[in-house]
Amino acid sequence: MAAGVAVAGVAISGTPASLSGDELATYSAVTRSLGGLWLLVQNIDGHFLPYYLFMHFWTLLGDAEWWLRLPSALILGVAAGFLADLGRRLHSTRAGLLGTALFAVLPSVSYHGANARPYAFAAAAAVISAWALHRLVEAPTVRRACWYAVGVALLGCTHLFSVLVLPAQLLAAAWLLPRRELLTRVLPAMAVGCLPMAVLGLVGWGERHAISWIKPHGPDVLLKFPKMVAGSPVLGPVLFALAAAGVVILLRRAADRPLGALLGGWLVFPPVLLLLVSALLTPAYVDRYLFVAAPALALAGGITLAAVHDLFRSGVLIPRLVTWTVVMIAAILGMPEQLDYRQHNGHYDDFPGAVRVVQAKARKRDAILYGQSWLRTGFGYYGGNDLPDDVLRVGTARGKAFEYPERSDVAGALKGRTRVWIVWRGTKQSGLTGSKFPQVEAVRAAGFRLSSAWHSAELPGLTVALFSRTVPNSS
């Protein structure tokens, strides 16, 4: 319990970062009526329906940044508690505690624990399902099989690609159990648990246009996996090497080999299988989809540290100093990313900063345009009604997508205006050169010229540009 509270506290503490574009999609979805949410998921994000339903009722109590992100922090606290007990079951109590400590200091845990998206829930479901499988293997009763089915169902209800951990669980179960128990307990429970995933998977396949932005990747992208699963380019490879040693430690003993296969497969199968899906079906390899492997990374590292402690247990103080010093070093190696995630633009979008730029210099009768219409959600969230006139908007984002309906005659909308703000997600160059955002070209064609431009520090970030003209267009 204490471990879970600690992880939840680390994840949510001191995080003033602006909501990201993805989090604003969550906000847009869950603040609709149930009918509006149902209309949305029939066109996009249908596989997130369980998460959106939960968050819909959660936001009935509030929609502040911290409140939107609190469920992710709490569920990672729950995951930490189960991870500690899973480590005890696989190796020792010390391994569970050390693995949970490593989990707590991962920058990726801090990021997803303060992220209003379902990835923290996916990681927690992976831990819970592995824990339930171990209990089922210990005593293959119908009741424990039912609990394992629930754990597998949670996987599919959080994020479709979280089920990529199941091959590792199946491999371990096949290694540990007689064929009869495997066929009558584990496989039926897994099949029942996969039913929600099958339904949501069909929905997701029908809405695969929503991930058309994902680019194909080659096998070389796997080299970046340690960095992304840990959330740190320095800590990631170090901890991955430590985790690999933990898997080897389990594989060396015949009795522990199935458990080594469980942890090793949990760590390796998700990125490899996701890359295979991307090559055979549709590009889908995105770093955050693989956060589900982070608990395995931490727990395998904890097993290595526990084995080191046991190796030198002739002493009392020295082994404890060595193992917990490694945890402290891991925390220090990840500190730059921990601090970065807690910056105002730590989630790679600085909506409050962009809003402040506009509000600080806005004048009466100014207009504002958006390069991507969904940006209105962020500006409305942080700026409220204290913004220039939104002259293109003709409706709300309450239909089948996150975008807003707009009028197309920019020149007509700007009639009588002398200044117009344009906001887009991307660098200054992406909007000011070329024709990526037609609003910019239309504003220039209407006689406006660039007066100033501001860009947030991160990439692609947000750009706010002010255009003005001397004489209002009265035509």
Image (tube, grey):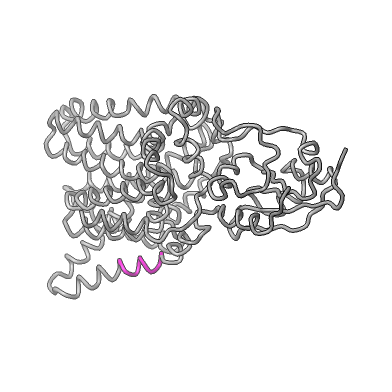
Return the residue nearer the eye: 283 or 352: 352
Which residue is at 41% across, 66% downward? Answer: 335
Dominant secondary structure of the residues highlighted in magenta in the image: helix
- Magenta residues span 327-334
In the image, farthest residue toward the front? 364
Q: Measured from the top left, where is residue 151 in percent x and y?
A: 26, 36
- Residue 262 in which image quadrant: top left
Left or right side of 115 for 310: left
Observer able to see residue 164: no
Q: Measured from the top left, where is residue 76 in percent x and y?
A: 32, 49
Return the residue nearer the eye: 192 or 177: 192
Which residue is at 53% across, 57% downward? Answer: 345
Q: Is residue 159 above or below residue 333?
A: above
Q: Measured from the top left, where is residue 389 in percent x and y?
A: 68, 44
Q: Measured from the top left, where is residue 336 in percent x and y?
A: 45, 66
- Residue 333 in which image quadrant: bottom left
Which residue is at 37% across, 42% downward? Answer: 61
Which residue is at 45% across, 56% downward? Answer: 227
Observer able to see residue 469: yes
Report the label total.
0
Task: For the C terminus, give its image quadrant.
Answer: top right
Is 331 inside the magenta-drawn segment? Answer: yes
Return the residue nearer the eye: 11 or 135: 11
